[in-house]
Image: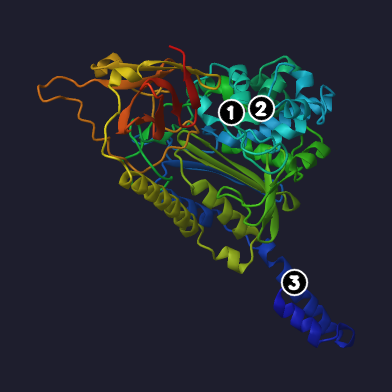
Amino acid sequence: MYPYTKQLFRKIPLGRACPSFAAALLGLITATASFAQTVRPTIDEIDAWVEAGLERWDVPGLTLAIIDNGEIYLSKGYGVRELGKSSKVDENTLFSIGSCSKAFGAASLAALVEEGALTWDDRVIDHLPWFRLHDPWTTNEIRVRDIITHRVGTGSTQQLRPLVHNRRDYLSRLPYNTPDHQFRDRYGYTNDMLILTGQLVETVSGVDWDSFARDRLWAPLGMNTTTARMAPANTSPNHAEPHAFRERRYVGGYNTPGPPLEPVPWQYAENVMVPSGGVISSASEMAEWMKFHLGTHPSPPLTKASVELMHTPHTVIQRPTSWMTFEEPGAYAMGWATGRFDNVTTVGHAGAALGFNCSIAMVPQKRFGIFTTANRNSELPYVLTKWAVTQFFGGPEARARDWHAEHERNVRATNRRAGEAEKTRTETRLSQGPSLPLDAYVGRFQNNFAGTLEIQLTQDPTEFQLRPAEGRAGRWDATPGVHEREEPNMDRTSSDGRDKPFLVAQLDGREGPIQLPLDPWHLDQFDAWYGDIRIGVSFTINDLAKVTGVTLDYYGDFERIR
């Protein structure tokens, strides 16, 4: 109750007030309590806000669906599907929704539970006997509900994406990675376990995950163009192109001045990552998905009990991140994050793929939902989601907040920290070259997590592909940075005009060898670059001045085998 209504209650005993005054007071109290729920932004106001947001965040196009009181309030597109072309985004334009896919992964398990094919408390190894984690106890105890509630502890081994050939190959390497935290002791966001969800669904159902989701979830909802396959999406005449910065190096966050955006090819290891990410959908069809979760769809594919369980808190989140539509401690449910946001409880998620960012949030008690996605990596979908929820349900203070400015401050702070760390690293650099002749570092190295690493020596830059196996810029978690970084000051030409020799690190990759030139940093430490990610490379030298091993950031220690 608002403060001034409390004061009225203290000053005026209702039993002694005249009927007309009591009625007026009751009307005032009711109006005050429901003010935030009765004020709705108009379509024109939403349009104006979005158009201004596209310009402010330099986003080519965006699609948006809003459900109010269980029915579609708005479903439309803004901007263009591809820079340099006139094709407009509309409510049926297909976008990648990244980790907003995780809710579909949870729902696919719920469908199997309803069919009696498994239970939430089944042990994973009862269905996948070959599956292993970092220790025998965790391997034995992990249950179906654990893998969609972010509490297993594996972390997210994004760096495996360019290396592995399929989902089982990815999962088989998890025992060799260092855990992020202890099993069930806290929240730890991970893609690994949602990848496991896809393997589990395919094993139990006998069909690939995309087909299962299409038949069991999407078809009943009329989501006929939603898919987890890039090929049908890319052949659709109405799909958005992702935009990023190709073949450059960056350090930093999403929204600071950088080189011009350009369309890039769709990138996703669908035979590995689905349903952790990779679902492709439109505003009009995601509106049907939200109506189902809000209990107003005429053909729900799952029971109300399953939906309520998927929205129920399981793992406490002490510090919400920028994509979460709550600011105090909340929780991860099953494929959803949930918490209090001003006057309401939200259930939502966000997602990123190379050149796409997505956000979805629902207020089940109000039968409200918002879905939005943009065709570049940007915080705009998160900002729009928070603005919309507060405009529909927030109190005056929340409605007046400048969500643009708040997110921009966070981005600038992130970029500043990254810049300061890089500056510190540069200032402490030793002006000393490698301690051994370059050919002494050549050899073959091995570890169980990343496989075989070859260190080779060349004088001919054309001898190697010298680019990531993915073939395009972007981090392996599909979120490129935007601070352009100068190319290393590598003069590979000697005084007589001949090319100088340099080292190349090569890992086996899904799309071919990953070949990365090594830039000397100091002594036996080198830098390699995968897209915009710097990978530190440190060689181990024994007392006989022999190279015995090498350590790569993200991939661990490799032992020399040749």
**Gap between marks 3 and 1, in whole Å?**
51 Å
Mark 1 Cα-neighbour bin, 10 Å: few <14, some 14–19, many ≥20: some
Q: Nearer the viewer, residue 68 or 503?
A: 503
Work out which residue is located at the far left of the displayed protein and give it. Answer: 496
Residues at discs 2 and 1 in contact (Cβ within 8 Å): yes
On screen, residue 397 above or below 234: below
Q: Residue at x 61, y 59 (%)?
A: 390
Which element carries disc 3, helix, strand or loop? loop
Residue with the mark numbered 3: 1
Q: Residue at x 36, y 48 (%)?
A: 424
Q: Residue 297 got which mark?
A: none
Horizontal side of residue 321 vs 245, given as left or right: right
Which element carries disc 2, helix, strand or loop? loop
On screen, residue 166 above or below 294: above
Residues at discs 3 and 1 in contact (Cβ within 8 Å): no
Q: Does residue 162 appear anywhere in the picture?
A: no
Number of marks drawn:
3
Residue with the mark numbered 1: 177
Q: Which of the two labelled residues, at mark 3 and mark 2, occupies the earlier sequence position?
A: 3
The quadrant of the rendering that contains the N terminus is bottom right
Mark 3 Cα-neighbour bin, 10 Å: few <14, some 14–19, many ≥20: few
| 3 vs 2, front mark | 2
Q: Which of the two labelled residues, at mark 3 and mark 1, occupies the earlier sequence position?
A: 3
Residue with the mark numbered 2: 134
Q: Which of the two labelled residues, at mark 2 and mark 1, occupies the earlier sequence position?
A: 2
**Gap between marks 2 and 1, in whole Å?**
7 Å
